[in-house]
Image: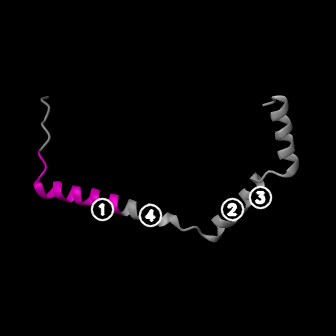
Amino acid sequence: MPELAPRPRAPRARAAGRALFLATLLIGGLGLAACDEQGPAERAGEKIDDLVNDKGPAERAGETIDDAVGGK
């Protein structure tokens, strides 16, 4: 059975496809731009992260000793 060549798309269908593609890009870009503001849950999570990641005096002293003796 011979292979059928694909039919060329009509100019209107091609324009509609491009418009749909551009609209998708625009909506996606707007969605990413809207993520700049942080909500209360995200701010609270960052505060918790800061508390967990802060080094206390004992940890800083241990790092100073490690540096002095060539550890890590």
Front: mark 2 or 3: 3
Callout 2: SS: helix
> Sequence-wise, which precedes: disc 3 or disc 4?
4
Q: Residues within 10 Å of mark 3 (few under 14, many from 20)?
A: few
Label 4: element kind: helix
The residue indicated by pointer 3 is 51
Q: Earlier in the sequence, mark 2 or mark 3?
A: 2
In the rendered image, which residue does mark 1 sit on? Answer: 23
Amino acid type, callout 3: Leu
Q: Point out the stretch of residues depicted in magenta.
A: 8-26
The residues bearing labels 1 and 4 have C-alpha atoms spaced at a distance of: 15 Å
Q: Nearer the viewer, residue 44 or 1?
A: 44
Secondary structure found at label 3: helix
Closer to the eye: label 1 or 4: 4
Residue matched to label 4 = 33
Please provide percent x and percent y for residue 24: 33, 59
Q: Are marks 2 and 3 in contact (CB under 8 Å)?
A: no
- Report which residue position mark 2 lands on: 45
Between label 1 and label 2, give the one nearer the viewer.
2
